[in-house]
Image (cartoon, grey):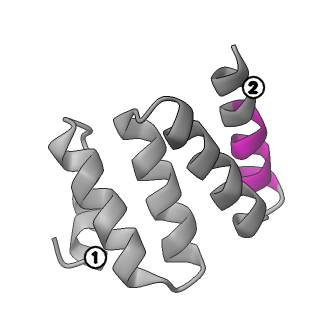
Amino acid sequence: MLIKLLCSLNNVFFDKFRKYFEALADFAKAIELNPEAEYFYKRSNCYFQLGDLLNAKADAVTALQKGFMIPDSYKTALQL
């Protein structure tokens, strides 16, 4: 339940307010509690928006390894 709440807050921070640092912290906590592929992908997007391509790529690779389908445009942007 806590993880779902964190993710809901993250979506608001990330999508509506562009508060990437806040969303990044929440996704890190969600990953700590339950390391699902979607959380790695969303944290990757936060890193990307903040210009941290190294961490964005690392999280995207983890999401892919866990079976998450990442859009081709994002793979291209990260040179995956």
In the image, the segment drawn in magenta is 8-16
The residue that label 1 is drawn on is 78
Name the residue at the front extreme.
32
Q: In the visual, does 35 lie left or right of 14? A: left
The magenta stretch spans residue 38: no
Residue at 52% from the left image edge and 86% from the top image edge:
51
Residue contact between numbered discs 1 and 2, judged by CB atoms under 8 Å: no
Q: Which residue is mark 2?
A: 5
Residue at the image position 40 percent from the left and 82 percent from the top: 53
Q: Amino acid at mark 2?
A: Leu
Q: Residue at x 16, y 70 (%)?
A: 80
Q: Position of residue 12 (x, y in %)?
A: 78, 44
Q: Would you say residue 21 is visible in this rendering? A: yes
Q: Residue 11's quadrant in the figure?
A: top right
Q: State which tag comes first along the sequence, 1 or 2.
A: 2
- Give the percent coordinates (x, y) of residue 78: 28, 76
